[in-house]
Image (spheres, rainbow, N blue to C red):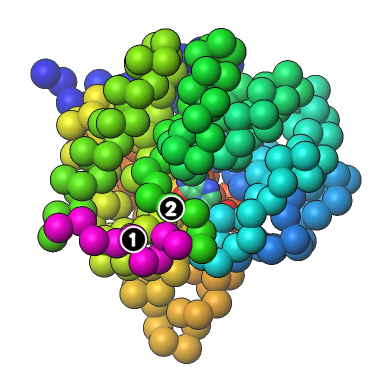
Amino acid sequence: MNTDAPLVPAPLPENLVAPARAGRALVMGVVNVTPDSFSDGGRWVTTELAVAHGRQLIAQGADLLDVGGESTRPGARRVDPAEEQNRVLPVIRELAAAGIAVSVDTIHAATAAAAIEAGAVIVNDVSGGLADPAMAGVLAAAGVVYICQHWRGDPRTMDGLTDYGGDVLAGVEAELRARLDHLADAGLADEQVVIDPGLGFAKTHEQSWRLLAATARLREDLRRPVLIGASRKRFLALALPDDVAADPLARDAATAATTALAAAAGAWAVRVHEVPASRDAVRTASLWKETR
Ligand code: PMM
């Protein structure tokens, strides 16, 4: 088996298919329309600011945008789906109308359905369908690409759910496999589904590093494209000098380094807040892979 052969999710617009076929990881720029996200909370909270920020990320080289209206940082309070939709739908509508590929970051089936209606081509669900039993039905009916992230509990409980019996990779793979079975039973096609180990979600820092380093293994074992979301996360602090480690904005260089490593390991996409360095990192990884 050629484990380097690209795994390309479908259906997606051509601008997302071509790089993936050529073996270049996609850069997904984060647009958080939330007052309380851990890394950029409150900065893009109006529709106008969020759309302008999204357009800037595209101009900087993002391939697609991930628009979310509910913060998932540890301890964050849950957002009512109606409030979430008020935040994200106008932003998605405007970005999609401008021809930009948009993913909606939501754990709510009703928000996913409304976002697809507004033009989103991907549903990114940090709960992998566990938060809302109606999610799989919406995805099967709409036929869109789904990012199925590993999750064990919401932001208020997840930091206490890190016992994997000594083998985080085996635990995450087994739990993701169960989600893949659930999605197949609900009628999703295999190529609709991207997997994500959920760095920082019910993981210690060391467990997040172990999963990041296992990007190629995850892809090969589960035979699905992999998305990596390392951007500005707390586990990166282990790679930083003590005096800056606590500042999420000081983690962008380490984020770009994880982008290069994940892309070289065959990740389909990386989800990042700061685009230019990751844009260059995915191309660096492509050249590395082509010429090694
Ligand atoms: N991380 C966050 C939010 N959404 N989605 C996926 N698929 N993977 C992630 O790792 C992920 C995500 C948390 O980061 P943020 O609050 O800065 O957006």
* Residue 97 vertical position relative to residue 76 in the rendered view, above or below: above
Q: Relative to residue 278, is residue 168 drawn left or right?
A: left
The magenta-colored residue range is 157-165
The reply to whether discs 1 and 2 touch (Cβ–Cβ < 8 Å) is yes
Viewer-proximal residue, 154 or 20? 154
Residue 155: where, in percent of width, then height? 51, 59
Work out how far the residue at label 1 is from the one at label 2, CA to CA, in angstroms: 7 Å
Q: Say few, some or many: other residues with alpha carbon within 10 Å of mark 2 (under 14 / 14 to 19 / 20 or more).
A: some
Question: Going 60% across and 63% down the picture, which residue do you hit?
Answer: 76
Question: Going 78% across and 33% down the picture, which residue do you hit?
Answer: 89
Viewer-proximal residue, 146 or 245? 146
67 part of magenta stretch: no
Question: Dot 2 lies on which element?
Answer: loop
* Residue 187 vertical position relative to residue 82 in the rendered view, above or below: above
Question: Dot 1 lies on which element?
Answer: loop
Q: Earlier in the sequence, mark 1 or mark 2?
A: 2
Which kind of residue does numbered mark 2 sit on?
Gly
Residue 268: where, in percent of width, then height? 39, 33
Which kind of residue does numbered mark 1 sit on?
Leu
Residue 218 shows up from this direction: yes
Residue positioned most to the bottom? 243
Residue positioned most to the front? 133
State the residue position of label 2.
Answer: 153
* Residue 182 vertical position relative to residue 262 in the rendered view, above or below: above
Residue 1: where, in percent of width, then height? 11, 18
**CB at disc 2 and ligand 1 closer than 8 Å:** no
Q: Relative to residue 21, is residue 109 drawn left or right?
A: right
State the residue position of label 1.
Answer: 161
User: Residue 135 bears which disc, if any?
Assistant: none
Question: Going 29% across and 62% down the picture, which residue do you hit?
Answer: 162
